[in-house]
Image (cartoon, grey):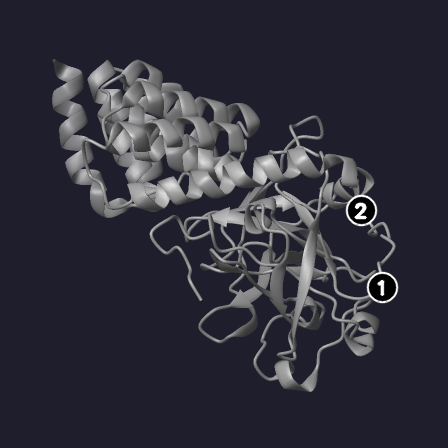
Amino acid sequence: MKVRKALLPFVRCMAFVTALGLGAVLAAMVPPVVTPTFAAACDAPAPVCGWKDRIVGIKTPNMIASGIILPDGHIVTNHHVAEDHPQVIIRDATGRIGRARPQPHDAAVDLALLRPEGPTPEFQELARRTGSMPQKLFVVAFDQGRNGPRVYRPGDWARYPPDDASMRARIHTNARALPGNSGGAVVDAEGHLVGILASGDGKISEIVPAAHITAVAARTDSSHSARFSKIGRAIRECADALYDAGSISRDPPPDLVSVIESRCMASGNKQLLDQAGQSFGRWWMFDRSRLFLERSLALDPDSPNSLMSMAVTLHLDRDLAAGLPILKRYLAIDPTNAQALRMAVQVAGGLGDREFGMLALDLMRRHNPAAVPLAESFLEKALAE
């Protein structure tokens, strides 16, 4: 089974959950039940472990990913998993194999509902979590190495988009996730579904809020087939081009540049926009890099991954003034990132911004003390000039 490993871990590795007409599995969904098979292998709270029964592995011609079986039997995953494929292969927690078909919709969000083989299920609206937004989140998804569902190490912080944000805006967390996990469930310690894993870089994961699943179901209709497939094709062609771009360090072929520009922008997919921006930045095509990263940040202004990519592009382009507010926004979200702190010190020194320099040093003392002496020496000289 082919997994496009050259891309960032979650571009082609998503997870879908499938209902194969398994009465026991579906009945165990509300509330989740921990099966004896998996109980011994899961040290998370029982309501979290119970989600393992709802996870399916998904195979398409391009990737292996994850999915979640909903109470009515539908499977939810990312649109960038389904792409424009008419059907996908699914494997449930018991090892049984089946097929499911993506259902077209016109919602501007990276989600898709899959209809498994058998009678057409009627969508049931998910119960919504009330109360404070949890900070400790768990990813429950299909693990390629174990060839089955797994609960990963939880995160200790999460940042949620405002109520008026774009549907493409994400929840961001440091919950652990790996290739093949996209499309998996992200839940709190009480077992409430918070969202669907969309992407990540091994450090910060991006999550589509679960509230959007109902919106997708409400806007699912066969009349959207052509557009849904068109966007899926753009996602696939963009991802293919980015895969090819991974082995090119400089001077990419003009036709590859053209495909990335047209297909990745047409995809409207946030992580593909990020990766296109990163590729152009790596090739020192800074205008193109900024264009794609600005588009990504317009969709999700508080995305740490997008902010860091933009900060690196501006740093390489030596536009320190433009990089200053980007780094401030990033450090307000994740003050522990050693690369961001180093860039902050360099930007403060280059601009003669003592206040920002002292802020960067203070954060460094708390989160990366070994780097402080060199940073202090640099700032002392830079600010004295």
Quarter-of-image position of residue 151: bottom right
Q: Position of residue 92 (x, y in %)?
A: 65, 72
Instruction: Report whether 168 appears left or right of 285.
Output: right
Asked if residue 302 shows in the view, the reply is no
Residue type of the residue flagged with mark 1: Pro
Question: Where is mark 1, residue-wise?
Answer: 119
Instruction: Report whether 6 appears left or right of 159.
Output: left
Residue beneath the point at 24% across and 21% down: 317
Q: Secondary structure at mark 1?
A: loop
Of the numbered discs 2 and 1, the one sitting upstream in the chain is 1
Q: Secondary structure at mark 2?
A: loop
Q: Position of residue 161 (x, y in %)?
A: 63, 34
Pick whichever, 189 or 24, lies toward us: 24
Residue beneath the point at 61% across and 59% down: 88
Instruction: Report whether 141 appears left or right of 336.
Output: right
Pick whichever, 51 or 83, lies toward us: 83
Question: Where is mark 2, residue-wise?
Answer: 130
The Cα atoms of the two marked residues, 2 and 1, are separated by 33 Å
* The N terminus: image quadrant: bottom left
Please tell me whether residue 324 is drawn above or below residue 277 in the rendered image.
above
Please tell me whether residue 37 is drawn above or below residue 189 in the rendered image.
below
Residue type of the residue flagged with mark 2: Thr
Residue beneath the point at 69% across and 45% down: 133
Q: Position of residue 93 (x, y in %)?
A: 64, 75
Please tell me whether residue 5 is drawn above or below residue 105 in the rendered image.
below
Residue beneath the point at 53% across and 36% down: 269
Instruction: Report whether 19 appears left or right of 243.
Output: right
Please tell me whether residue 309 is drawn above or below residue 128 in the rendered image.
above
